[in-house]
Image (cartoon, rainbow, N blue to C red):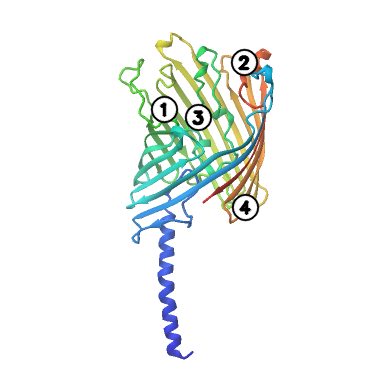
Amino acid sequence: MNNRMKHAFYMALLGISLPAAFYAQEQKTVIDDKYVESDVVPLAGKQGFSFQTKSGDFLFKPYALVQVSGKFNYYDDEGLNLADQDNIANSGFAIPNAILGFSGKAFGKVTFNFALNASQSGGALLQQAWFDVNMKDELRLRVGKFKTPYNQAYLVTLGETLFPVLPSSLTTGVNLDKSLNATKPNISTGFDIGVQLHGIFNNRWGYQVGIFNGTGISTNEATKTTSDDHKWLPSLLYAARMAYMPHGVMPAHQGNPEDLQNDKMLFAVSGSWNVEAEDESSDDLRAGVEFAWLKNRWYLSTEAYLLQMNFTERMQDASNFTSWGGYVQGGYFATKKLQLIGRYDYFDRNGVNKKGSLNMPAVGINYFFSNYNLKLQAMYQYIGRWGHNTQDDRDADDNGMAMHSAVVMLQYSF
């Protein structure tokens, strides 16, 4: 090859590589935007499948999460049909989540997210749909259906939780000692429709203040009225959360094999007031405190929370009902692919005015298949009953909950 041909070859190679390098850099700059969120799988910094304009003003990034699990649940004898007594129930295979969504940004100011969960039905089929106006780091406005600012267990990315199921103290309804027991609210609030102001100051202080319907993920309609006891106050959910992160923003995962050299810590307090939440029967006050620490291969988090139901005047009941719970959980990467996990979950399900509580230890493992976006999770949980006055009280307290439960779940995401 003569010098002229070599020169032409190098110029052609340079002409190909420079635009490709520029495009790759532009792609990385856009996708690394910290505001591109999904709450399902991590998107920031992921180069995967996406669409964007040449100027980078608009980014559209689809994502998916599929979870398939095998479950075994063994129940003790209370609450079973004596004519057909079967202690093994709610066992077999399940699809906890089959989510397809997209997230992105527009014009450097607005980020958005939309997700359908095919494993659900009714209003819960629409898992989330929101847009976020990013005025600056300290002031952002989110409108739509999204996670309410309460409970760190819910606020982490769905596909990056430490256990395949959330703590039972959050997801199980309380046991009221009244005929109202059919309402049985959970301590958690989860997804809801509303509006929220949020932001981060100095990369350390985070806040969220919002107003929501208070009807949860299963309702997409406007169904609320004004309060009977608090005149002219809309019967909505008013919520707030404040977090302090001394070493910078806490990652949204609970253990990631690609993040084993990090040191982050979080302290947070949160609370909400759901005005006439249970079919105009009670005003539900919730409060919680949180701590989380990510240190290299270790992850630790703990929460304590309470629910106080204050019954309205029409209930003609001067008393109220208060239940509380909490958990501590941790994980350690024994190898770069294998994470060992443990959790202790506590639930005063029948209220502070009645003796007895539920203690729910759990152990498990997480295994990450590198380069395949596959995650295998397995856990076992036992429910122990402690401090009840009578055997009937013990039987009633964990009614509807499995004494022994095991879950194996395989997850794929992109």
The amino acid sitting under disc 4 is: Phe
The answer to whether any part of residue 265 appears in the image is: no
Crowding at mark 1 (Cα within 10 Å: few <14, some 14-19, many 20+): many
Q: Quick one: label 1 or label 2, which is nearer the N terminus? A: 1
Distance, label 4 to label 3, CA atoms, is 32 Å
Residue positioned most to the top: 316
**As drawn, is 179 to the left or to the right of 393?**
left
Q: Position of residue 356 (x, y in %)?
A: 63, 18
Residue linked to disc 1: 214
The amino acid sitting under disc 2 is: Lys
The amino acid sitting under disc 1 is: Gly
Residue under the point 43% across and 85% down = 7
Disc 4 element = strand
Distance, label 1 to label 3, CA atoms, is 11 Å
Q: Quick one: label 4 or label 2, which is nearer the N terminus? A: 2
Distance, label 2 to label 3, CA atoms, is 23 Å
Q: Reply above or below: 61 against 123.
A: below
Total numbered circles: 4
Residue positioned most to the left: 232
Disc 1 element = loop
Residue linked to disc 2: 355
* Label placed on residue 369: 4
Residue positioned most to the bottom: 2
Q: Quick one: label 4 or label 3, which is nearer the N terminus? A: 3
Q: Position of residue 373 (x, y in %)?
A: 57, 52
Disc 3 element = loop
Q: Nearer the viewer, mark 4 or mark 3?
A: 4
Residue under the point 40% across and 11% down = 314
